[in-house]
Amino acid sequence: MNSRKTEFLAFIGDLQNNICKALEDEDGKALFREDQWHRPGGGGGRTRILTEGKVFEKAGVNTSAVHGELPPSMQAYLKTNHQRFFACGISLVIHPFNPFVPTVHANYRYFELYDDSGDVVDLWFGGGADLTPYYLFDEDAVHFHSLHKSVCDRFSPELYSQLKRACDAYFFNHHRGEARGIGGLFFDRMNDADDRGFDVATALGDVFIPAYLPLVMQRKPTIFTDEQKRWQEIRRGRYVEFNLLHDKGTLFGLKTNGRVESILMSLPATVRWEYDHHPQPGSPEERLLNVLKAPVDWV
Amino acid sequence: MNSRKTEFLAFIGDLQNNICKALEDEDGKALFREDQWHRPGGGGGRTRILTEGKVFEKAGVNTSAVHGELPPSMQAYLKTNHQRFFACGISLVIHPFNPFVPTVHANYRYFELYDDSGDVVDLWFGGGADLTPYYLFDEDAVHFHSLHKSVCDRFSPELYSQLKRACDAYFFNHHRGEARGIGGLFFDRMNDADDRGFDVATALGDVFIPAYLPLVMQRKPTIFTDEQKRWQEIRRGRYVEFNLLHDKGTLFGLKTNGRVESILMSLPATVRWEYDHHPQPGSPEERLLNVLKAPVDWV
């Protein structure tokens, strides 16, 4: 096993442990359960799920490391003739109970392609993190974006705005004409020349806890009404629509016979679809919708 | 306007009225509201939605009649070089509140393709109806299938089994290895030689009320627990997964800029995703799952 693979596997294992520990501490009631699974084609993963906590209604923090032969659909998607691959990563989605605490998603991954003799012919990193609030506090959006920007700025002055724009473009519910949330970062196929891919992915992974947990601490005591919970559940419906209609990771996972329960852990526990729902003019709910229709530069 | 078009438009308008009236009478509390909408490319529809009734949590009974130019993706799907089209139909999804009352879906539609001089070069009917129970009563499944079979048998002895198999194949959640419900009928591209397409579609449309309403009457007084309601909401999650991941009508509607709220009226009001949920061995919930994994011949 080459050293890059070893190093990134160790990184995602540690990050999974650290994030789960931090979330359990913050929740104060529920603990993660772990399911280890094996992929028939090679490899497997550790799915960790926390449900019905005091703070978190449903949270999944998964790692996986799989290898084998790419199906033709995946070869076409990656525009490669090579078939042998290795992929590993960490993927998390956290759905808090309180509608004033935002939902968050993050994912950092590493990919290798091999020729017939088993030599690495291509490798890259991908990932990102994005925030989905139900009530928008500008200072929360600024905090989340600022911490991610400070990591990007260590590498190049353009990196943050490139990855921020890619995130706004990717997490977009085209059929609704609105973003899933208030963005973050998204990148794919970042190569590892001068260790850049590894360094960017791991530095961003390490900023997840300080970027997200302070928002949880700040907002979790907020009193909310049944109507505000209902609004959160309606917006969660848009989250489901994005993940099942547009998210490439979800669709490829399901089409390539990935473990369904690990893939669909991203879906919130309780969700609501109301016909033709429109928030009151001038309300905080309407303001959120307006921001989602035209992504904002937060920093 | 040719007579086939006129006749089928009149049929779906009457059927929409009759079904809405029957459901309102059965509900006894809520009424349908109607939204008329216009399609920029030509035509429009009448969307009728009933919500938060005594019996029905959410019900949509829609008609539409649209015309114009097919987008290239739709031409490819229909395997045609012709671009001008007319389509009309009725589409309904009914989600009852009580988990012992099954959800139902039905759709009957008519399609015409034109050459450049405006002459009809192809026309066909499509549609079907299928039942999605949360608790399985064999006699309900037999009633629903028997009434649909009795209509099919008027046309040919093989028709029912052909359309029943097509329904089992179509309404299948491939990623879960289970059917959406206990089936019914499904057909597409049925031509109108000897008036067959029209006669089949209208006769099946007319059997909807007697096939479904007796099940509502029979089951709606059943007392249920919070756990049984929860099971219904978990199964509704599978309904959402089918409609957003696999249903061709939903995906094409969204990709061709159809009216989002009319298309997604099919999604239930309250839905739940629990990680890796498994019913108790030997329970009615487990029996339903076993039936969905291997479709049954009900008549």
Image (tube, coloured by chain):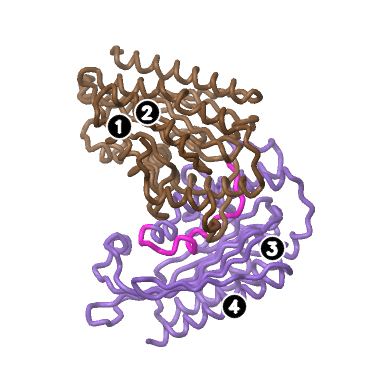
Chain colours: A brown, B purple
Q: Residue at x 25, y 18 (%)?
A: A195
Q: Secondary structure at mark 4?
A: helix
**The C terminus of chain A sits in image quarter:** top left
Image coords of residue B117 (percent x, y)? 23, 82
Residue B110 visible in rendering: no
Which chain does the residue under circle 1 lie in?
Answer: A
The vertical placement of B37 against A69, above or below, is below
* Residue pointed to by mark 2: A148
Q: Give amino acid for label 3.
A: Gly
Image coords of residue A27 (percent x, y)? 61, 25
The range drawn in magenta is: B255-273
* Residue pointed to by mark 4: B17
Front tag of 3 and 1: 1
The vertical placement of A295 against B297, above or below, is above
Instruction: Tell me if B186 is positioned left or right of A293 in this view.
Output: right
* Residue pointed to by mark 1: A160
Give how far apart the Cα atoms at labels 2 and 3 are: 47 Å
Cβ–Cβ under 8 Å for marks 2 and 1: yes
The answer to which of marks 2 and 1 sits earlier in the sequence is 2
